[in-house]
Image (cartoon, rainbow, N blue to C red):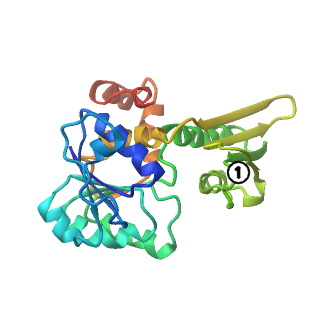
Amino acid sequence: MKVGLIGFGKTGRAVASVLLESKEVNLQWVLRKSTILEHRSVPEFLGVHSDEPGLIYSVSEFSADELLERHPVDVIVDFSSADGVDYYAEAAAKRGVTIISAISAYPSDKLKVLSDISDKVPVLHSPNITLGINFLMIAAKILKNIAPYTDIEIIEEHFKNKPEISGTAKKIAQTLDLPDDSIKTIRAGGIIGVHEIIFGFPYQVVRLRHESISREAFGNGIIFALENLVGKNSGLYTMEDLLLPFFHLNSPEQEYIENNTKPWWKFW
């Protein structure tokens, strides 16, 4: 499976290293705004042994049409910014390229762009594409359905200089139909990211907690998405759409999953 990666910051580099180590994925190129690393080899830059080309290009060198014409891919993985979709959307849709976007927040006009191209190709958007966070949100929704009047609080912890409330925490609050003021923030040291949902019952407390140990966790989520999204019909998908079938225990759907896909825990 040929993949192009847009965005090469700290998270993009961690994702690239995971993609390079996967036997199912061939990282064709990385695209970034800066020209500083232009034409460098990603495996060489990251110190990862790989025979894949993985060259770095800048957006100023090619239009999206030129890039996809010269270096075609099956999937574009976007870890850039909300504006990145404007660069590749039309060209990708025209060529049937699947899109996986892990941008944490889009304004409404960019979400419309994703929605429009999903009429032609499969598009997945996940503000936090780690498997653990998405499992946590599904589990939290199930628990809230069981006990809808439970007191629920959200705690998010990040590195000292992160100024804004975590986009993932806001997504959790939205998923549980809670106001943003139910989110408590902690800023300390170099914490990569911790999200905890507390369910306060009268005589017991349930805590659902996810901690990102390293940014490579986003790469694990991308591999899972690649394995479970490619080949699907056009449409706008979420990680919940891909994970929910795995909750159908002892059912025909579960039997199909066991026979045709990898268990979700193998992607951790």
**Along the viewing direction, whichever of 129 and 33 lies nearer the viewer:** 33
The image shows a total of numbered marks equal to 1
Q: Residues within 10 Å of mark 1 (few under 14, many from 20)?
A: few
Query: Which amino acid type is shown beneath numbered disc 1?
Result: Lys
Q: Tell me where residue 2 appears, x and y as whole percent.
A: 20, 47
Quarter of image, res 95? bottom left
**Along the viewing direction, whichever of 223 and 144 lies nearer the viewer:** 223
Instruction: Give the vertical position of 143 relative to 153 (above or below).
Output: above
Residue beneath the point at 51% across and 50% down:
128
Instruction: Give the vertical position of 251 relative to 81 (above or below).
Output: above
For the N terminus, give its image quadrant: top left
Q: Residue furthest left?
A: 70
Q: Tell me where residue 30 appears, x and y as whole percent.
A: 29, 55
Q: Is residue 70 left or right of residue 219?
A: left
Q: In terms of secondary structure, where does tag 1 sit? A: loop
For the C terminus, give its image quadrant: top left
Q: Is residue 115 visible?
A: no
Instruction: Give the vertical position of 38 relative to 41 (above or below).
Output: below
Q: Is residue 199 left or right of residue 220?
A: right
Q: Which residue is mark 1?
A: 160
Residue beneath the point at 79% across and 31% down:
205
Quarter of image, res 4? bottom left
Residue beneath the point at 47% across and 47% down:
129
**Along the viewing direction, whichever of 77 and 109 lies nearer the viewer:** 77
Q: Is residue 194 visible?
A: yes
Q: Tell me where residue 125 appears, x and y as whole percent.
A: 43, 56
Q: Residue furthest bottom?
A: 109
Instruction: Give the vertical position of 141 relative to 126 (above or below).
Output: above
Residue beneath the point at 29% across and 47% down:
42
Q: Tell me where residue 87 appears, x and y as whole percent.
A: 32, 71
